[in-house]
Image: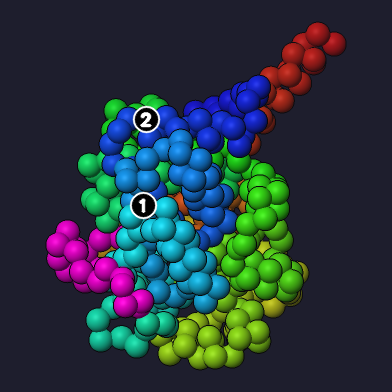
Amino acid sequence: MAIKTIESRVDIVEAARRRISNVFSNGVRVYMSFSAGKDSLCMSHLVYEKILNGEIDPKLLTVIFIDEEALYDSMEQMALRWRKRFIAAGAEFRWYCLPVRQVSILHQLQNDEAWITWEPGKQWVRDAPPFAITRDPRLRYTGQMNYQTFCSAITKDGIQMVGVRACESVQRRDYLANAALRAGGLSKENKVFPIYDWKDSDVWLYIKEKHLDFPDAYIDLYRVGVSRNRLRLCNFFAAESIAGLRYIAETDAKLWERIERREPNAYLTLLYWDSEMFKRSTRKRAALEGESSKDYRALCRQMLFTEPEKYFTNEGTRRVADRYRRFYIRSHDVMRPRDFKQMYEALIAGDPKLRTLRAMYVTVYSAYARYSEESAARREVNANA
């Protein structure tokens, strides 16, 4: 599906304010997802301002913080501050510390991409706050749900506001663009995205103009060379935030000790950062692996068709491989060498949420469409010559 961008006469901040007002005008329970990251801080401030100005009823608001355990200390402190603000303003703030299933990019050696936050019997990265909710009847078994499924379960009696932005990734842009086409549209999923059209620059400008405090971890990552558009804070072991993990050993020895005690494979980020395990494409990796001589098309075919039992040994990885296999069969004739390389690295590093696969659909067929248009134009020129 082609995605069309339309300019509006209303600036993005005012548009977000109107969306929030519309949500609360329904008079039903509103659940706001909070992560202590920059996006949720902006959305929280917009809501908080409206509460202070008497524009919305705080009794309708429930803030939900799914504590992922493996978080930067500055993120925990930020969550604590906003908890106090919302409670003082009359809203409910639920801080969950539950054994939900997460994805860890560090578990590939065990061919198991799952890890459990606040898993019973483990020595956690940090202790749960004394006021945290540690049990819920909808979560009967350890690792039964991921946090997205759990959030859907606890918010189904109201509207959920989420700070997802379209520009963060191809996958999120595609998700938001196609939301209205899915059965029931957004109303069936009961999700609203007030800042979906904000860019990174909009987020940081809002933080600057409103003098918002934010987790120090952003500054630490930026200082060591992480570009502004790649600043992501979530659990240490996720693909989106793993880049920051390799710097902790040198900047915060005590935190690194706690991380390594919780996740013994954390050292892999130090040893293999410049490798296909982390989907890196650097000169250092090219020098180490001599990857220019690799036949990625043949490697993908070997993994998916010749020896799948060697590479995909559990239900989760086999399910992912099956989706990639179908994509390969359908698309291999129009895929470029770089596409086969991307596919191979995704199969090696793991793609449990199929984010890379969804991105490949867009890049492969967009490139093919451009090639077809250019070829048609050349044929027309030659015909008229």
Q: Quadrant of residue 110?
A: bottom left
> In the rendered image, which residue does mark 1 sit on?
91
Location of residue 66 in the rendering, given as x and y in whole percent from the top left corner: 36, 62
Q: Earlier in the sequence, mark 1 or mark 2?
A: 2
**Residue at image coords 32%, 43%:** 60
131 to the left or right of 283? left
Numbered label attached to residue 25 = 2
Residue 57 visible at all:
yes
**Residue at image coords 24%, 43%:** 156
246 to the left or right of 227? left
User: How would you rate the neighbour count of disc 2 (Cα within 10 Å): few for under 14, some for 14-19, many for 20 or more?
Assistant: few
Residue range in magenta is: 128-148
Q: Between residues 51 and 273, which one lies in front from this camera angle?
A: 51
Mark-to-mark CA distance, 1 and 2: 16 Å
Q: Is residue 133 shown in magenta?
A: yes
Q: Secondary structure at mark 2?
A: loop
